[in-house]
Image (cartoon, rainbow, N blue to C red):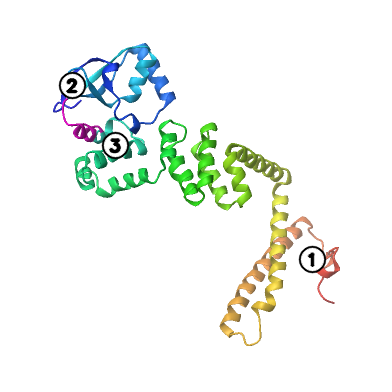
Amino acid sequence: MDPGYLREVKEIEIAHLQLRYAHTRIHRPERVSSLASSIERFGQIIPVIALREGRDSFVLIDGYLRVKAVRRCRRDTVVAEIWECKEEEALVKVLARAHTRKWDLIEEAALLRELYHQYHLPQSRIASLLGRKQGWVSGRLALYDALSEDILELIRKGCISTWAATRVITPIARAIPEHGKVLSESLTKEDLSTRDLALFFRHYQKANRKQRENMVLQPALFLKALRAREEATEAKGLKEGVEGKWLRELRWIAHRLRGLLKEVPTLFYSGQGNLDRRILLTALEESQGLFVELEKKIRRLDRDDHPGEPTSDRESLSAGSAHPADQPNP
């Protein structure tokens, strides 16, 4: 409540309210339902803010969800703080009262845009009035302007979140407009969490063309299939235990070593500089050292499991391979 602008608090007919800034607000059905339930039980506790424009005409500045909730309760009047000041002053005052409410980025940016475009206030002036830096104002205006009108309308309707629009849909739409449009339509039918959308976007960035087309058409189905694969992998890992994990990693190392073998003729050649060759050989020696250490550790544990048995009586760890090509040259 601002004593400088406030003239009175009274009940006014909703029919006398001009919803001039409805386009700057996001529809939140769950919030409206909660407010309506509270109003039914306890009455309207917090007044809306309205600006007197004529004898029986008022512009609703703040409280759009409360008006919807009051209407849901089948009431014709709403309790309002009646302010008397310029509209731009009222908008600034509402924006400046950050301690009384948490603004959605798009709602905040939309009101800043009204001040900048409708009332022609310079960005530096807006920043000064709100106690902010000019970069804060310009950043929010840029955020709003980067979104297409179609996406903005979906945000206003509460079909998609601001986060989804700015972090997922817009980057995709910039690269492939058709994918952005299809994904927007898909998200109006499927309720995905922020975490799900972040996961979706990470996989979209790595997917091929056909996979991307399927992903934007059915994002929820993609995530369901992804979780199924992850659960299957987890179940397989639990079944195999640490032994299975160790074998998989050892096989992967063997696969990489076979690849390195093919590259030897390219990496080591006649006339190669001593420094270049020394760097490669040093890396090889370090890796060899790790293999030797691994074998020593296994041998120590093997001796502990067979006390009193001569080491020479046991075959080496590399013996007994089913593949003669794996054996050392005689």
Q: Residue at (63%, 49%) from the top-left corner?
A: 210
Q: Relative to 37, is 58 on the left or the right?
A: left
Which quadrant: the N terminus? top left
Cα–Cα span, label 3 and label 1: 73 Å
> Closer to the N terminus: mark 3 or mark 1?
3
Disc 1 residue type? Ser
Q: Which residues are magenta?
A: 84-94
Per the image, the residue denoted by label 1 is 318
Q: Residue furthest bottom?
A: 271
On the image, the x and y values in percent for residue 313 come to 84, 66
Q: Residues within 10 Å of mark 2 (few under 14, many from 20)?
A: few
Q: Residue at (40%, 43%) from the top-left corner?
A: 147
Q: Residue 111: which disc?
A: 3
Q: Residue 282: which disc?
A: none
Disc 2 residue type? Gly
**Residue 318, picture quadrant:** bottom right
Disc 3 residue type? Leu
Per the image, the residue denoted by label 2 is 54
**In this view, the mark in front (2 or 3):** 2
On the image, the x and y values in percent for residue 221 come to 62, 37
